[in-house]
Image: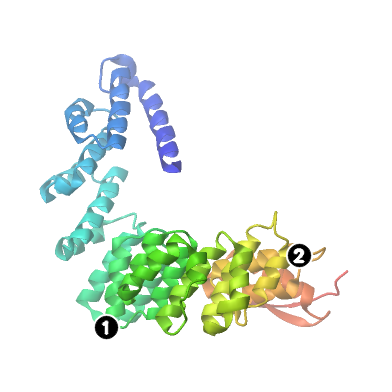
Amino acid sequence: MLYKFLFSAALSTALSASLLSPAAAQNGSSANGAAGDNLMLEMNKAFRRGDKNRLAQLLPQARGHALEPWAAYWELKARLPEASAQEVQDFLSRYAGSYQEDRLRNDWLLLLGQRRDWVAFAAEYPNFRMNDDKEVRCYALLVEHLKNPAQDARLADEVRKNWQSQRDADDGCTAAAEQLVGAKNLTPQDVWQKARLATEANRPRAAAAAVQIIAPEAMGMVTELNASPIKFLTGKHLAISKVRREIITLALVKMASTDIDGAAFQMENKWGMQLSTEERNWVWGVIGKQAATRLGTVPASDALQYFAKVTQDTDLTDDMLAWKARAALRVGSQPSWQQVLAAVNAMSDEARKDTTWAYWKARALLATAPPNIPTAVATPQGVTQTIVIAPQR
């Protein structure tokens, strides 16, 4: 919805500009006149409806309009699956250097990846200037893997980050992850973590796609826990295997997103001792995060009590640790600086470089260090500086 709003605003601005252009002023019937602008608005509406016939009918009338590249993009994008490679190349040549050219290239690369046309994909990918699509990047990494498996250690790390950061199910990163799991460059734990993240984000399709890679036999249980996590958790299931424990973990994660107290009760009275340490820490991290995100209705102290059940903060994601730090900053009359420091220290190197957490780590060090003791502080640029802590007043 936000994209549509911003695009509509941009389109309206561009149309207003075209109405004020000298060409339009001299020739009100030109492609850049009011009639042309109404045509562009109509084409945009047809594009949103997916009306390929109407777009094809209107496109010739858009020639010469200031927004002709958009008109051509809408018309070709609407029928891209049926378009020929030559039509795509003709568009890329005609509008070379424009935003619409690279936007269509993005769409075309996604389609080539879905078709597994790696030769055509590899030929076009170097021309992708924006390089802002994680799914396209995953396809590119998959192509690199197929060409040179020796690079898999680097590829696996980037695939993992892209895949786990994608909220919705996508073919590119899922296909790359599946290939790298098969080659033992990604671990089953990486896949389970993706399933947990997708479950917490209420993306059941993405979670199911991950489970399908390593435990297709568990898909029935995935369907069951998505239908009713509490019914699943109070049923006759036992955590008798790694797969069973992970499926139970998914059910607890899903339950925590809507029923914090219920998930905590299940952990304390039934499932906590049946899970591994890492699984248990992850679930308590999710429960703590969910409590912390409700600081208007749930006291920060409650969130910290849930986080206190985590025995190793490095088992948590950066997002969980960020919410632990926020809860620690808002607890009581004074922040719990030790908790803030512990949360930031457990974050990944990338997260610790964020200026927000670099600042709060420095504040925590100032608040917790003995007076007049030299203390090393890492700046966001990674430079370690030594400062002398003055007594706090």
Question: Where is residue 368 shown, x and y percent of the image?
Answer: 78, 76
Amino acid at pointer 1: Ala
Amino acid at pointer 2: Val
Image quadrant of residue 351? bottom right
Q: Which residue is mark 1?
A: 150
Question: Where is residue 10 shown, x and y percent of the image?
Answer: 41, 35
The quadrant the N terminus occupies is: top left
Image quadrant of residue 222? bottom left
Give 60 or 28, whichever is nearer the viewer.
60
- Indicate which disc, 2 or 1, sits on the residue closer to the N terminus: 1
Question: Where is residue 288 shown, x and y percent of the image?
Answer: 63, 68
Q: Callout 2: helix, strand or loop?
A: loop
- Indicate whether 251 appears above or below 27: below
Residue shown at the point (76%, 82%) measured from the top left: 374
Left or right of 255, for residue 79: left
Residue shown at the point (42%, 67%) measured from the top left: 164
Q: Which mark is residue 331?
A: 2
Residue 380 visible in the picture:
no
Q: Residue furthest front?
A: 236
Residue shown at the point (25%, 19%) measured from the top left: 30
Q: Nearer the viewer, mark 2 or mark 1?
A: 2
Would you call the spot at circle 2 few (<14 residues within 10 Å), some (14-19), or many (20 or more)? Answer: some
Residue 33 visible in the picture:
yes
- Indicate whether 86 appears above or below 327: above
Would you call the spot at circle 1 few (<14 residues within 10 Å), some (14-19), or many (20 or more)? Answer: few
Inter-mark Cα distance, 2 to 1: 49 Å
Left or right of 23, for residue 322: right
Residue shown at the point (73%, 72%) measured from the top left: 364
Q: State yes or no: discs 2 and 1 in contact (Cβ < 8 Å).
A: no
